Amino acid sequence: MISRFVLLCLLFSVVSVPSLAEDGYDLWLRYPVADAAGYPSLGSGARALVAGNNSPTLNAAGTELQRGLTGLTGQQVPFAVDVTHAGDVVFGTPQSFPLIGRLQLGLSAAGDEGYVIRSRVVSGKPVTVIAANSDVGVLYGVFHFLRIVQTHGSLDALDIVSRPRTKIRVLDHWDNLDRHVERGYAGQSLWDWHKLPGYVDPRYTDYARASASVGINGAVLTNVNANATSLTAPYLEKAAALANVFRPYGIRVYLTARFSAPIELGGLKTADPLDPEVRAWWKQKIDEIYTVIPDFGGFLVKANSEGQPGPQQYQRTHADGANMLAEALSPHHGIVMWRAFVYSNETPTDRATQAYDEFKPLDGKFAANVLVQVKNGPIDFQPREPFHPLFGAMPKTPLMMEFQITKEYLGFATHLVYLGPLFEEALAADTRVKGRGATVAKVIDGELERHELTGMAGVANIGSDRNWSGSQFDQANWYAFGRFAWDPEIKARAVAEEWARMTFSNDGRFVTPVVDMMMGSREAAVDYMTPLGLAHLMGTGHHYGPAPWVSDLGRADWNPTYYHRADKNGIGFERGPAGSNAVAQYSKDVASVFADRAKTPEQFLLWFHHVPWDYKTSSGRILWDELVVRYSRGVDEVEHMREAWSGMREYVDRERFTQVSEYLAVQKQEAQWWRDACIAYFQNISGRALPAGYAPPAHPLEYYQSLKFPYAPGGSK
Amino acid sequence: MISRFVLLCLLFSVVSVPSLAEDGYDLWLRYPVADAAGYPSLGSGARALVAGNNSPTLNAAGTELQRGLTGLTGQQVPFAVDVTHAGDVVFGTPQSFPLIGRLQLGLSAAGDEGYVIRSRVVSGKPVTVIAANSDVGVLYGVFHFLRIVQTHGSLDALDIVSRPRTKIRVLDHWDNLDRHVERGYAGQSLWDWHKLPGYVDPRYTDYARASASVGINGAVLTNVNANATSLTAPYLEKAAALANVFRPYGIRVYLTARFSAPIELGGLKTADPLDPEVRAWWKQKIDEIYTVIPDFGGFLVKANSEGQPGPQQYQRTHADGANMLAEALSPHHGIVMWRAFVYSNETPTDRATQAYDEFKPLDGKFAANVLVQVKNGPIDFQPREPFHPLFGAMPKTPLMMEFQITKEYLGFATHLVYLGPLFEEALAADTRVKGRGATVAKVIDGELERHELTGMAGVANIGSDRNWSGSQFDQANWYAFGRFAWDPEIKARAVAEEWARMTFSNDGRFVTPVVDMMMGSREAAVDYMTPLGLAHLMGTGHHYGPAPWVSDLGRADWNPTYYHRADKNGIGFERGPAGSNAVAQYSKDVASVFADRAKTPEQFLLWFHHVPWDYKTSSGRILWDELVVRYSRGVDEVEHMREAWSGMREYVDRERFTQVSEYLAVQKQEAQWWRDACIAYFQNISGRALPAGYAPPAHPLEYYQSLKFPYAPGGSK
């Protein structure tokens, strides 16, 4: 019978008493109970949370502190009005709690939104003080304090001052009113418009907690491809219900303004921004918005781009359009974020040059409460692009960075691609407009030209999926965006480590390999999709998978062949003086590098130059061979990621471990598909043999060309 | 300082150590730890789970037993190979466990899918035995046993035999390949087609557990408005991945067959069901399906209805179409479910008569593995309809019931409407085709005409929402569907009570008022939407809210005015001999009742008759007054539901309590809207004053007519 018993035990799954499911919902705000050894920094500290008067925001801060410390210690941490124990945590502003004012904390360094976290002795007890000049600063400080505890940092001799380096730190939700999310891979829109305002999902609060925890202070609720209906009274009531939830967390609500709304909603004959009736309509509409949402943030506008209406239809400029809205918003302290991502109806010689050509002449013409929002690169959120030439080129205009957090061009939800290195690379790029050190970071944080109004936008990767972002690791991109918006000079590796510790485990055997894997993941994706400066080889419309052969779309610059320009002689888009001369849009020092094929960093080689197949690269290999090597290296790197993750089983709960594992298997398969399809296609053009030791594609080119994905998610509809 | 301390305690939310969140995800399969007093039936019983050989299905059964009893008792319940304790639970089939065969359990009464649960003494110990002739029967028995425990039933002297009275118990998912769910109000489709088969969401397993727990044994994965792409090889691989998950739970996968697939996928010139090439194409396709999904269930087909292609395009009959597919499925033991919900391109004199007119002549012409699937009523899932005249009218053909679980016409997710009474009313309706007692239940369970192949389909209300069904109480409709499919003569109140106990609480102070509320909820919805036999007054397309005034749609029978036919003399659709004579489609005994205005049950009065406004109803009030009274009563009833629920706070976790409360507030508001809009409209026609004491509508009719809901969820697209 023993053998049957053993059999039985082996065959029946073992179920233990249910434990708290780990499905990713808690994001990095996990406060799992751990033994004392697990949180050495906490030790026997944190006896009580000592505060003064309350406010909705201070309540949010106190509640989070209590939730975090109670969760982490497994013991109810009480509130108190006086310090009575070593390890108490004192928090507040000089206004909310006179004790804070008396402690000489150097709060002037914290500014409006920043905070200090300092170790002090109060009533003879060593305590930690989290203080700020504003309630929301206290909230940010609380999240920082919790992060220290969550990541096993030391709580001794704390002496932290932090303030955000950009003012507007906003998530752009490309969410439609039917809950479809354009370029969304995480289910539907979080905003359940139909049930709002009657039903307010508690998830909205958790969204606000998570965003505030990394310093995000705004949410554009609606798609940049805008719908005027979002400005009607019923939808303003719905947006107001969200604003009410977000307000205690310091998050303002913004909407996208469809430029033709005066026609569609107001029944006017024109949307000309200089027309008095149009101006009156917008003024009235904006006044109406502020009666419903008193702290409304303002508008994000995509105009005269990809079919969206705009001022150019009336022979007016982007500045005319932006300033009209800005004037009406100004009395309410609202702002306009006007996108520089434009492409006109005519096919240009080089798509990469359009934004600069249209916006550079408008420098100095925008109202004081307008930000021009510029994508990190001149095309469209590719795995790698050089920095956008507008950065540094409009000194009189505050430029806002637009990153894409959702992975439209990066494999959707199933590919593990940590974007920290992309953010860091883009922000560290040196425009050299005022000598060395004029980095993009210093352009957008206002330091370079002393702008007060500054900002960073991230196209959100958040949806109704239980794990919020479509995958566990995509949460890191939401997290990293907030951290980079707060400090554009932060390091991607440090951010990854914070996130991995909070989200999964502090065990060094987990942290090191996983952070390594994250840090290498973006370069892997570049390699298996678009190595050496290639771009825009993705499938038509949905951007899923490889389609470098597509050449028959309605406009030349919609085609992958427009971008890679491969022919029997070579590959790449010549943007030097012999080509489109797009390099001339950069400062002289930068242009001289990019214009010269020999000086151009290899990662941008084919972005700036059409290069012969037998061009000798830095590896000593000819370009064709190097291309094959890079594609193959990308696939190998994903395999290494799979191997690394497979060793993490003991540090991660089963549900998240399995999901990541299955996604990595998909990524491996799709990386191989990318490599094989691209090599099959480019080989057909180059006519060259694969370098020795590199396997041919698994299928003939026709197979890859035959694949269709009519229901790939996230399309623009 | 005391007062400030009190203030602090009051102002800061109190957070306790995180407990298992109750958000509805667990459905009725909740196994919360309770003290011994909470589960008196369990007492010190259930020491060990005693089983024999294993199989995937027996593993699922054992795992569920262990999960349930371990959860409910808070103590790990082990597996064992021999009875050693009083209270052990023995489970299996005679094949898996010889002990079962020796116990003389009367298994012949359990049939293929049924089970027995009996108290026995084994090895001198009193034990419970769960036994069946098949593994899936054991699984069903396990869920029944757990239900007894969950609802605090007695485990003494158990003597249960249960077998399903229908063979095909299937959920119809109207899910598109882009995850849009037609008439879905619970988020997106559960099936993440894009990520399948690479990523298999663990949620699929929980779906299978829940469905199997109420005896559901099939899932039609795709929309009846079918897409041929679902029959292509990549999508068959995706469906196969789901089938692999469902198989241990006894759930077979079905697909919808687009009738024109031979043209769209096969490149043929025709889809004529008598064309040899077409027949060969389907045979090959079906053989292909079975290589990928060996236990594929078969097809559901909507043909020649609402624009779907079908055999009538080729001058063939529904039987020709169904039989062609049936012939190719037959060697694999697959079936065809052919829908009788048809309406042709020509506007009929009476939409209610079409299905009968088209299908009755085909009785006896369908192949043996074809079921004709008939909606419960002759129009389309209205809040109340008389039973469909096809029931009883096709004795040679097995008719399958089609209920709609999703609340397309019943207020979507936010209205609490328990459908048990609707199911019970429809199934208990007496067709009188063979004298009294020839109920619809006996038609569809095969008893009346001795059919072996029987079935019941429910249009699923399941989606990606965390609570699965869009609301907590809509889960009860999924649950009830399964219970009615298993036993078409079960009672709605008993089902509601089971569900409420398992889903929320066994406390009698909760159970009684909540079951009362559930039982009254459908009649409330009938009253505030379509009292006295009215139908189809909903908003165009989306069916959200009232629009009785709509009269300008492309076809007469799309308009609410077609259905209510209100004029200055009266209201209602005359279906007696003086009108469309639809009553003649019923058996003589039934027809004689419905044909006579005086004999027609008042709940169907305006369904069958055009009645003068001053007609004296059974209350003594004239029809107009009665209409106003009923509309008002519906609103009042919702207010009573709100009051009842507000008293349930202490029995329900905060998250679910709050969600239900907010939804009931929405329902109240919308019930009022329905009442006011309908009264405003009908008063405009009747020209009569409201009865004394009844408030006029809050707004003029034009206001209600002006409301637009372009983004109401669940549209057919």
Image (cartoon, coloured by chain):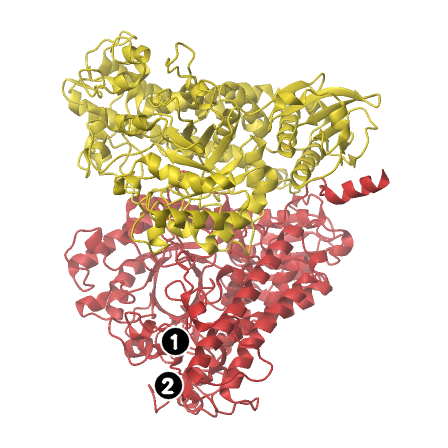
Chain colours: A yellow, B red
Is any part of residue A328 visible from this angle? Answer: yes
Examine the image and state in which quarter residue B685 appears: bottom left
Question: What's the residue at 72%, 29% (across, down)?
Answer: A94
Q: Nearer the viewer, mark 1 or mark 2?
A: 2
The answer to whether residue B57 of the structure is visible from this angle is no
Q: Is residue B557 left or right of residue B410?
A: left
Q: Earlier in the sequence, mark 1 or mark 2?
A: 1
Three-letter amino acid code at the position of disc 1: Pro
Circle on res. B378: 1
- Label 2 crowd bin: few (<14), some (14–19), many (20+), radius 10 Å: many
Total labels drawn: 2
Residue B84 location, x and y as percent? Answer: 72, 48
Which mark is on residue A457?
none
| Furthest-front residue in this view | A276
Q: Callout 2, which amino acid?
A: Arg
Label 2 belongs to which residue? Answer: B575
Q: Is residue A529 above or below residue B482?
A: above
Question: Does B649 sit above or below residue A642?
Answer: below
Where in the figure is residue A680, as x and y percent of width and height?
22, 26
**B138 and B565: which one is in front?**
B565
Residue A164, x across and y down, in percent: 55, 25
